[in-house]
Amino acid sequence: MNRPTDPTTATAAPPSEARRARVAVSTLFFVNGFTYTNAVPWLPVIKAELGLSNTELGMAIASGPAGAILTGMLAGPVIHRFGSGRAAVGTSLITLGALPLIALAQNWWLLATAFLVLGSADAWTDSAQNAHGLRVQRRYGRTIINTFHAVWSMAAVAGGVVGATMAGVGVPLLAHLGGVTLVLVCVNLLVSRMLLPGAEHSEREDGAEGADGRRARVPVRGLLLLLSLGVLLVFAAGIEDSAASWGAVYMTAELSAPLFLAAMPFVACQAMMTVGRLVGDRVTDRFGAAAVGAGCGLLAAGGMALALLVPYQVAAVAGFGIMGLGVSTLFPLTLAAAGDVPGVRTGDGLAVVGWLGRAGLLAFPPLVGMLADATDLSVALWAVAAAGAAAFLLSPALRPRR
């Protein structure tokens, strides 16, 4: 619900159906975070086996976000046709089906197609699992959305570790990705029976959907709020990606760090982002989503400013860690607010705002790169600090509206 919770509601035990559904949604988030990251450590091997140039590999990988951009808006109709629970499980199975196709690809076109399918289905899964997570959150009567995203973060790290281990010990690529797919398919089917039954609009009271789930007329204020949340998610996505895209480059190019230390900004950002998401639910219920979003925007901006203003390796790692703590709740709270926009169906709100966020994720790294080429990277990364300041200014959009 993303608002300070009534203590009497917070202490009441949620119904067993909601508790089972929470476990199921957490599992779906884990599966989603664990899937693609198993393939990431294998990318140099795939590049070598297919004889791809750096540009060709990059273009193949870019097919994933391109597919998400092209088809992401279909998530809303899919959710409202099949329900968020069944949509999350079904689209997750499509994502898993694309994973072994990466190993089976014999040329650039097949590899790009595998990434295209994976990216498209992942966009649908992301909206559907968040929509069902919001249904569970409404049953709980308190914020739990951040915990789902914390599970995703931990799963992403775990997937990368498993993938690196399998590649390191010489397990065949197809055996690894095929085995992961088989296990995760079984997990998905197992938890599918634990999801909430009933109509998608069951827990909403704002008239976004009628008794039959038909789309209601969207007010202009709802459209403006969706746009504000979409822009906020663009900034959140840009901040979250900056450690992965530019942390190591900044450490080596600007601070002459060795390769081991160059990886530490990403590690620090991911670790602190996970911590922030684990505690984010209680903080949100205590202070409200808008206040937490404002504080997180300032933390993100301040962390990047520290990394840029204090030209030492330790300060840079600390700054990226603070930035990770700041951005930790921005993504889940923005999606939660998008699913609760008055007059807008949950799936539609998530699909629109999620689509804008992915567009930002596609555009932000090239923007920083162009600024770096025109000036230098230490100047270009101030765009990330500016994104944190912009998130602070847009944080009132996170305030619940009824």
Image (cartoon, grey):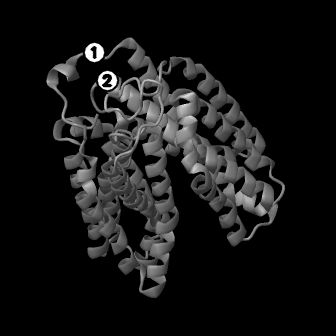
Q: Which residue is mark 1?
A: 13
* Mark 1 residue element: loop
Please report whichever mark, 1 or 2, sits nearer to the chain's N-terminal start.
1
Residue 139: percent from left, percent from top: 34, 22
Q: Nearer the viewer, residue 339 or 90?
A: 339
When the figure is inspected, residue 313 is found, relative to residue 344, above or below; the finding is below
Q: Which residue is mark 2?
A: 140
When the figure is inspected, residue 170 is found, relative to residue 5, above or below; the finding is below
Residue 288: percent from left, percent from top: 20, 41
User: In the rendered image, which quarter is residue 216 located in?
Assistant: top left
> Which corner quadrant holds the C terminus?
top left
Q: Residue at x 46, y 56 (%)?
A: 356
Residue 118: percent from left, percent from top: 65, 47
Q: Amino acid at mark 1?
A: Ala
* Mark 2 residue element: helix
Q: Residue at x 82, y 59 (%)?
A: 107
Residue 35: percent from left, percent from top: 60, 41
At label 2, counting other C-alpha atoms closer than 10 Å, the crowd grade (few under 14, some 14-19, many 20 or more) is many
Q: Amino acid at mark 2?
A: Tyr
Q: In the rendered image, is residue 264 in sight?
A: no
Q: Residue at x 44, y 18 (%)?
A: 20
Separation of marks 1 and 2 at Cα, in angstroms:
8 Å
Report the residue that reaches farthest toward the right.
Answer: 106
When the figure is inspected, residue 293 is found, relative to residue 138, above or below; the finding is below
Q: Residue at x 56, y 49 (%)?
A: 72
Q: Are marks 1 and 2 in contact (CB under 8 Å)?
A: no
Q: Nearer the viewer, residue 201 or 288?
A: 201
User: In the rendered image, which quarter is residue 234 located in?
Assistant: bottom left
